[in-house]
Image: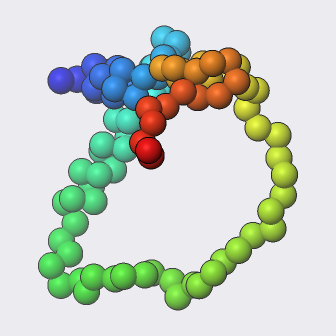
Amino acid sequence: MDTRTLVEHIAELARLRFSTEELTAFTAQFQRIVEFISLIESLQLEEVEPLVQVVPVENAFREDIPQPSLPREEALRNAPKHNGVFFRVPKVIE
């Protein structure tokens, strides 16, 4: 399966719709990601001790600053079900 077909398939599974330009851009980005993963897989790491945490940082909080969000219509655009205001999801708690 070529990269573009794979990106189209992933978009379909995620129920995302992209323009031709967006699909071309995502395909190029996805290809670079795959190449980077191949590079990482080729590293010889047998003698490197595994890390649980790279930097000893705990509770790095940031200031909660309100910022503008997506317009409602744009947020709901790719939702499989919505009522115009909220996402409609299957009931999971009785």
Please, is residue 39 above or below residue 72 in the view? Answer: below
Classify residue 34 by image quadrant: top left
Please, is residue 8 above or below residue 66 in the view? Answer: above
Residue occupying the point 44% across, 46% down: 93
Query: Which quarter of the rendered picture does the C terminus lie within?
Result: top left
Q: Give 75 or 92, whichever is nearer the viewer.
A: 92
Residue 19 appears in the figure: yes
Residue occupying the point 57% across, 84% down: 57
Residue occupying the point 18% across, 24% down: 1
Q: Give 37 or 60, whichever is nearer the viewer.
A: 60
Q: Position of residue 22 (x, y in %)?
A: 52, 20
Q: Give 51 or 32, whichever is nearer the viewer.
A: 51
Classify residue 39 by image quadrant: bottom left
Furthest residue in direction front, as rendered? 94
Please, is residue 19 above or below residue 87 in the view? Answer: above
Apparent side of residue 49 relative to residue 59 in the rendered image (left or right): left
Q: Position of residue 44 (x, y in %)?
A: 18, 71
Apparent side of residue 52 relative to residue 47 in the rendered image (left or right): right
Please, is residue 16 above or below residue 46 in the view? Answer: above
Residue 28 appears in the figure: no
Apparent side of residue 21 relative to residue 62 in the rendered image (left or right): left
Residue occupying the point 43% across, 81% down: 53
How many marks can you see? 0
> According to the image, what is the colour scheme of the structure?
rainbow
Furthest residue in direction top, as rendered? 20
Q: Position of residue 70 (x, y in %)?
A: 73, 32
Q: Position of residue 61 (x, y in %)?
A: 70, 74
Classify residue 82 by image quadrant: top right
